Structure formats: C-alpha cells, structure tokens
Amino acid sequence: MTLAELGWRPMLQQQISLEELEIGFAARVSAVFRDRLQIHTLVEEFSLPIMGLLANNDPIERPTTGDWLWLENHTNKPLKLFERLNVLQRTAAGSEAKPQLIASNIDTLFVVSSCNQDFNVSRIERYLSLVMSAHIPVVIVLTKTDLCEDVDIYVERAQAIHHDVPVIQINALSDDIKHAFEYWTGVGQTIAFLGSSGVGKSTLTNALLGQQTQGTAGIREDDAKGRHTTTGRSLFAMPQGGWVLDTPGMRELRLNDDLTGVAEVFEDIEALQSQCKYHNCHHEDDQGCAIQAALESGTLEIRRWLNYQKLHREALRARQSKHEQHEHGKKFGKEIRQALKGKKALRQWDE
C-alpha cells in the first residue's frame, strides 16, 4: 500500500519538517475506541493507547477516525496530529455545549434516508447543515426504493432541499451498488454514510466492501424506524481502492457553533431576509417583510421557515455556550494565578 492509497494528500506533505521526516512516519487513524486507537500504516495495522496521547485536553485536538498522525520510528510514539482537510463534528448531548468529533478528512459524505415513513425533510436539512459547515461535498442517498410505490415523490422532495446537492436513488440489495458509487470511491478516496438507524447505511457499506463486515437489522413495522447496528466509527478498505466509514445511527444530531452550514442549506431564506424593508426586521408583523410575503404567497414553505429558525437558534446557542466556556476558563485561570501569588506572598512573609 502507498500513502496515496491510504488517502494521503499533498497538503499533508507540506506539514512535515526535514527533522520530522528523519525520525518518523505517517499513519492514519482507522478507528477510535474508548481506550485506544486503531492505526493503519503502509505495512501494518496496530493499536495505540489513548492515555496521554498527544497530551491535549481540547476535544478538537484529539485524534478522530480519519486523522493522520506522525509517529516516531521504532517506538510508534505520536509526535503530532496533522492539520485536517475537514472535520465533521457535532455538539455532544448534555447541558454543556462540548464539541464531539465524528470523523475527519472525508472526500464525500452521503446523507442516507429511506423511502418510507422515516423520510424526514427537516432531518435531512439538519444533516446537510452539519456537513456543509464542515465544507465536505455531500450527496443525498435514497434507499429502500424497491419497497416504495412512487419513488419520484421522495426524489422531488429531496432535490427541493438544495439545488446543488445531488440525489441518487438505490436499492441497497441490488447488484449495481458499486457501479452507483464508483465516481466517489476511487483509489485513496474516503467516503462516509450519515443517517438515522435503519436507513441502510450498514447494508451499503457491506455492498461496497463485498462482504458482511457491518451487522444489519430490519426496521420496526409500526413506524419504519430502525435499530442501531453500528456502535463505532471505523474505516474499511474497499476493493475499488477507496475507504468507507460507517457511522452509528444519529436521529438526534445537535449542530455545532458554525452558522455557515445553516446559511448555505437555507440560502433562499437568507436571500429573502436581505430583501426586507428594514434591516432589523423581526419577520412577524413588520411592514415590508419579505419573509412574510413569501409565506403568504406560498413561495416559502412554513415548515422550512420554522426549521431554519430552529437550527439557526441551535447553532447560536452552541456559539454562545462556547464563548461562555472560554470566559469561564479565563476567569478560572486568573483565580488560580492569584491563589498561587497569594501562597508565594505568605511563604515570603513567613521567611
């Protein structure tokens, strides 16, 4: 295997100094577990303990699946984490808005939805907002088309979300899956599937790998919702030469503090807001409101407007929480320094 086959990019080469080149080698993180990383090199695959790894408490600076590390010769000690081409991250569940990395260095991400009761436009908009904030090329994949009487309805609704996002429809159990994805799965290319449980992500992964690597499960008949079958995030080498990442089902996917993804997915609404008569328009009963005019005429769907507001508020809350955490850290650090200065003064007084 060559570095290019492993997914290496020219931008990574520029991050290596001559000194580092003499003492180390490149390795890619293929999986992250609670206490260790799975590492791929040109010649072997092995595990590294996470404890003390790169000694960084910032979640953003911790290795995630898809990352590149520079390891020391003979000891495999991590010397540095390479700057990422991109990184997909969400806000972790809980009261604190802590970032949680999903994967990095992805060439194409596929948002997967099935053609049944579980199809949800608002959820797809949420996924797209997260992916676009990471500046990752994205494609919408509609699965279970063999179980649907009128696929065109789902295709039209998916295409209406964003005019620049391709939509493909497939039967995950058919024999032409590899052909349907061949444009995105060339040598060294890394793809990932994102979607809720039961939409067929693991089935797609197995089809591209040509073997039953990931477990699959059926959907519940009452609501067409699926069960979790993937519990971790791992990179698998495809026979075509690329790499595929299967992620656990994520029905609740909280946005991070980056508003650019929401703005891009809802670019039509952003454009409408700029046409309001007053720049501080509240988009309710304001005179000359372009949003209200579009809602009344039917050119803007009320569902889409409400979802835009919801996602925009969510990203803003994450941004505000991040700022508050930063300010809290600064205040705590100042208190520690003052306490240390006080102890020093007491010692001097005693002497």
Image (cartoon, helix red, strand yellow):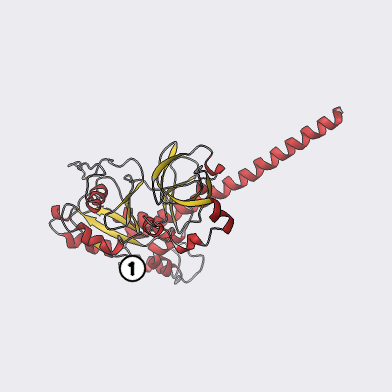
| Residue at the left extreme, as displayed | 149
Please provide percent x and percent y for residue 78: 52, 45
Report whether 92 appears left or right of 120. Answer: right
Q: Nearer the viewer, residue 45 or 347?
A: 45
**153 sits to left or right of 321:** left
Q: Is residue 325 above or below residue 7?
A: above
**Mark 1: amino acid:** Asp
Q: Say what secondary structure mark 1 lies in.
A: loop
Residue at (37%, 68%) from the top-left corner? 293
Task: Please indicate, yes or no, whether residue 291 appears anywhere in the rendered image.
Answer: yes
Q: Where 12 falls versus 77 (above or below)?
A: below
Quarter in which the C terminus is drawn: top right
Residue 85 x %, y % = 45, 59
Q: Nearer the viewer, residue 95 or 288?
A: 95
Residue positioned 31% across, 55% down in the render: 111
Instruction: Where is residue 58? Give x, y as percent.
Output: 54, 45
When the figure is inspected, residue 36 is found, relative to residue 168, above or below; the finding is above
The residue at which mark 1 appears reads as 164
Numbered label tally: 1
Residue nearer the viewer, 16 or 154: 16
Q: Residue furthest top?
A: 350
- For mark 1, does the 10 Å Cα neighbourhood hold few (<14), some (14 to 19), or many (20 or more) residues? few
Nearer to me, 88 or 8: 8
Q: Is residue 57 visible?
A: no
* Residue 135 location, quadrant: bottom left
Query: Which residue is painted at 25% across and 60% down in the image?
Result: 181
Quarter that holds the N terminus: bottom left
- Where does the image place residue 156, in percent across and percent down from the top left? 23, 64
Q: Is residue 21 left or right of residue 41?
A: right
